[in-house]
Image: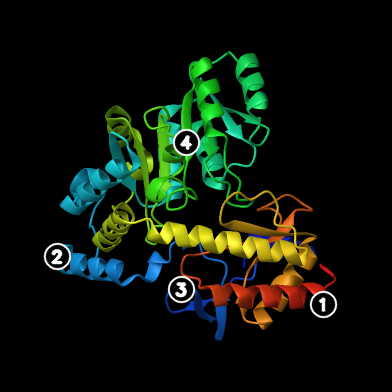
Amino acid sequence: MSDALAFIREELQKVKEAGLYNTIRTIAGPQGAWFEVDGRKCLNFCSNNYLGLANDERLKRAAKAAIDRYGVGPGAVRTIAGTQTIHLELEEKLAKFKGAEATILLTAGFTANLATIPALVGKEDLIFSDELNHASIIDGCRLSGARIVRYNHNDVASLEEKLRSETDCRRKLVVTDGVFSMDGDIAPLPDIVEVAKKYGAITMVDDAHGEGVLGENGRGIVNHFHLEGQVDVEVGTLSKALGVMGGYVSGSKELVDWLKQRGRPFLFSSALTAADVAAGIAAVDILTESDELVKKLWDNARYFKAQMQALGFDTGVSETPITPVMVGDAVKAKELSKGLFEEGVFAMAIAYPTVPHGKARIRVMISAAHERNDLDFAVEKFAKVGRALGLIK
């Protein structure tokens, strides 16, 4: 390492001394209720694979068939020679599923936010952003050059006060996560939409953790609150509940057409592979046909939360299957994660900078892939390690 990069060594040491160093473990094999982590068979409590679709045979068959028909790679960006018929098919299915006029596919949910926000607002504009919004929203806001006004988390009164007092701009954009990934709480979207309309602001919601979880057959937060046609921009991802890879934006036909003209990640990044797109189509078809997996996900979540609360663990303010086991101290959270791993439960500690100082936790991601005996196994291990660390009695 050159002298110019010597500061990295010092900064890494500080991170380690603070107990905030992120050890990245390696998974051998597919996602599922159980998998192999660093050579150890573990219960999977970390993945965003809410519905267990990441290794579903129907998705795998669809992906394999798409490779035979379309090949491995797209070969180009969508605007040159990268748009295949299968891309249009998934966009149409997603638009219908989400109750929107149109949808545009991108390579990830992260890039969907990076494409959308700078295409809607610029230096003459204001963005009103929930203080706990995801990093992809934050980065999209920064790239836009617009001035960012943060409002208190899920506090519509705070949002309205900011909208009322901040008037020196061309356009206003209100942006929020639908489900907040660290705490599992839900944005008060009906009230946000009402206030945004009152002040002539664009409304945008990132539903990455809501689709496949909220709404009819997992259609997401807009459907959950019956707000179809009232939310201007809905960002989604294929990489969580749908089990694949990719992102998308749903809204009016004009919005989608504009993003095709000005969304830089769409214009300058290669298209999604046909295999990913075909698997995404299969996932949407599964959800359209049945709510069985969504119901099982919620049944599992309610059971696990009840068992953990009975033991004395604090599961925070979650309203969804995301289950934060609040610890507070980052070092203690790391110790709990390490102890669970030694007992066969893979549940990573989340600490600063992902969450604020003093809010460290184990974030448990419940899945429809889990069976009741899997959840009982986890509860037993949480009890054992938690008592050893003095976290519960």
Mark 1–mark 3 distance (CA, rounded to whole Å):
29 Å
Name the N-terminal-most of marks 3 and 2.
3
Give the labeled residue for mark 3: 32
From this view, report whether residue 386 is shown above or below residue 129.
below
Q: Are marks 1 and 2 in contact (CB under 8 Å)?
A: no
Q: How far apart are marks 3 and 4 (CA)?
A: 31 Å
Viewer-side label of 2, 4: 4
Image: 197 above or below 25: above
Q: What is the spatial separation of the Cα atoms under label 1 and label 2, in whole angstroms? A: 55 Å
In percent of width and height, residue 383 lies at 74, 74
Instruction: Measure how far apart labels 4 and 1 are at the Cα level.
Output: 43 Å
Left or right: 368 in relation to 359: left
**Disc 2 secondary structure class:** helix
Q: Are marks 3 and 2 in contact (CB under 8 Å)?
A: no
Instruction: Name the quarter where the C terminus is drawn.
Output: bottom right
Q: Which amino acid does label 4 sit on?
A: Phe
Could you tell which of marks 4 and 1 lies nearer the N-terminus?
4
Q: Tell me if residue 25 can be seen.
A: no
Along the viewing direction, whichever of 380 and 203 lies nearer the viewer: 380
Contact flag, marks 2 and 4 (Cβ < 8 Å): no
In x, y percent, where is residue 243? 39, 62
Callout 1, which amino acid? Answer: Ala
Closer mark to the observer between disc 3 and disc 2:
3
Residue contact at pointers 3 and 4, CB within 8 angstroms: no
At x 42%, y 53%, the residue is 212
Residue for badge 2? 69
